[in-house]
Image (spheres, rainbow, N blue to C red):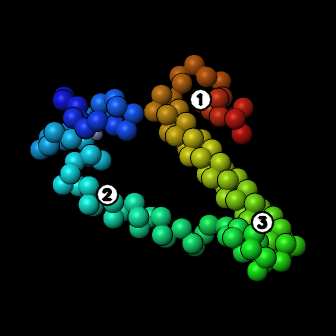
Amino acid sequence: MKTCSSIRNDGERCQAPAMKSSEYCNSHDPDRAEENKRRYSKGGKRGGRGRPRVDGVQDGTVDKGRGAVAGQLLNYMIRCVQVEMQAREQEELVERLEALEREMSFPHSHNGGRGALRTLR
Ligand SMILES: [Zn+2]
């Protein structure tokens, strides 16, 4: 497969694979440049919601104490989301392991092939 013929800012040639219809990769193709620019700038402007606002604290329009509490609550929420994601990930892993064990059905196991799972749970 041929590689993109664009030269990067550091002077090296872009290593990304070129698209079938172009000499350039997905991000360097001039035909797509406009589209990419639009997409990136939209992403930048959208940042308000769901992102902690620190400028209010910095310019004094938000009370420092309130800002601190809000920050703590935000951290707490992030932690909750992380824990939930980890739990879901583990559940999914256990399910996949169960499916694998059912398929393999460990003929010589003493407890019907569920040994590995017992120690996990
Ligand atoms: Zn490229």
Residue drawn at (57%, 19%), measured in percent from left and top? 108
Q: Name the secondary structure under disc 2.
A: helix
Q: Name the secondary structure under disc 1.
A: loop
The Cα–Cα distance between marks 2 and 1, rounded to whole angstroms, is 52 Å
* On-image quarter of the N terminus: top left
Name which of mark 1 and mark 3 comes first in the sequence: 3
Q: Would you say the residues marked 1 and 3 are in contact, meaning their CB atoms lie under 8 Å apart?
A: no
Residue drawn at (57%, 72%), measured in percent from left and top? 48
State the residue lying farthest toward the bottom.
61
Q: Around disc 2, counting alpha carbons within 10 Å, would you say few (fewer than 14), some (14 to 19), or many (20 or more)? A: some
Do we see residue 91 in this rendering?
no
Foreground mark, 2 or 1?
Answer: 2
Instruction: Say which amino acid is labelled 3.
Output: Gly
List the residue tagged with mark 1.
113
Point out residue 77 in the picture as x, y percentages from the top left corner. 72, 64
Residue drawn at (48%, 69%), measured in percent from left and top? 45
Instruction: Say which amino acid is labelled 1.
Output: Gly
List the residue tagged with mark 3.
71
Of the pair 3 and 102, the residue shown nearer to us: 3
Instruction: Say which amino acid is labelled 2.
Output: Asn
Residue drawn at (59%, 29%), measured in percent from left and top? 113
Name which of mark 2 and mark 1 comes first in the sequence: 2
Point out residue 59 in the picture as x, y percentages from the top left corner. 74, 74
Drawn side of residue 107 relative to residue 53, left or right: left
Q: Is mark 1 within 8 Å of ligand 1?
A: no
Establish if 37 lies above or below 7: below
